Amino acid sequence: MSTPGTGSGAGVDDAVRELLLLMPRMVGRAKRIPLPEALKSFALAPRHLSLLSYLLLDGPLTVNDLAARLEVAPTTVSLMVGELSRQGILARREDEADRRRRIVAITPEQQPAIAGWLAPGAAAWRTALAPLSPEQRRMFVDTLLAYEAAVGER
């Protein structure tokens, strides 16, 4: 195997080596993105990041929609939403089209802090993905999804 930046790097083992060295650095850097001062008093965990990202990027959603996107049970999302609602981060309201359903949204008071928290990661991904063609971006995302699935099988 060659070291990063040397040799052709065309072999699968070369790519695996580079990724095994890269992934811990990426995770470490992502974990060091500071929590905004307005959110420091809340007990936010990594599991909240995806839920908040969906609500920030896609707008208000139902618990079932969030559960489907997060690939977890609706009861799991309900517990997270309840916890974050009690802290004033999320708000639940009736769905005007179906009063049995609840719509979940980030509260207007917390929206700027959450957007600020997620902005550095979004900006870094935009920088990394912008030079790629749409097909290359799709391949990159599909590759990460395949990696996640393969790790999950273990």
Image: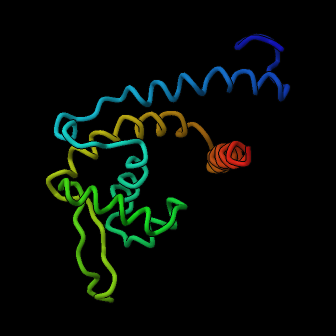
Q: How is the image coloured?
A: rainbow
Between 153 and 27, the residue placed more toward the observer is 153
Q: Is residue 112 left or right of residue 134?
A: left
Give the x, y percent position of residue 15: 76, 26
Q: Residue at x 44, y 30 (%)?
A: 30
- The quadrant of the picture occupied by the C terminus is top right
Give the x, y percent position of residue 115: 28, 46
Picture mark count: 0
Residue 2 against residue 121 in the figure, above or below: above
Between 73 and 51, the residue placed more toward the observer is 73
Between 151 and 21, the residue placed more toward the observer is 151
Q: Residue at x 40, y 55 (%)?
A: 51
Which quadrant holds residue 36? top left
- The quadrant of the picture occupied by the N terminus is top right
Which quadrant holds residue 113? top left
Q: Is residue 126 left or right of residue 98?
A: right
Give the x, y percent position of residue 85: 23, 60
Q: Residue at x 64, y 50 (%)?
A: 138
Between 74 and 140, the residue placed more toward the observer is 74
Residue 101 against residue 12 in the figure, above or below: below
Give the x, y percent position of residue 60: 32, 67
Residue 142 against residue 120 in the figure, above or below: below
Q: Residue at x 57, y 36 (%)?
A: 131
Which quadrant holds residue 80? bottom left
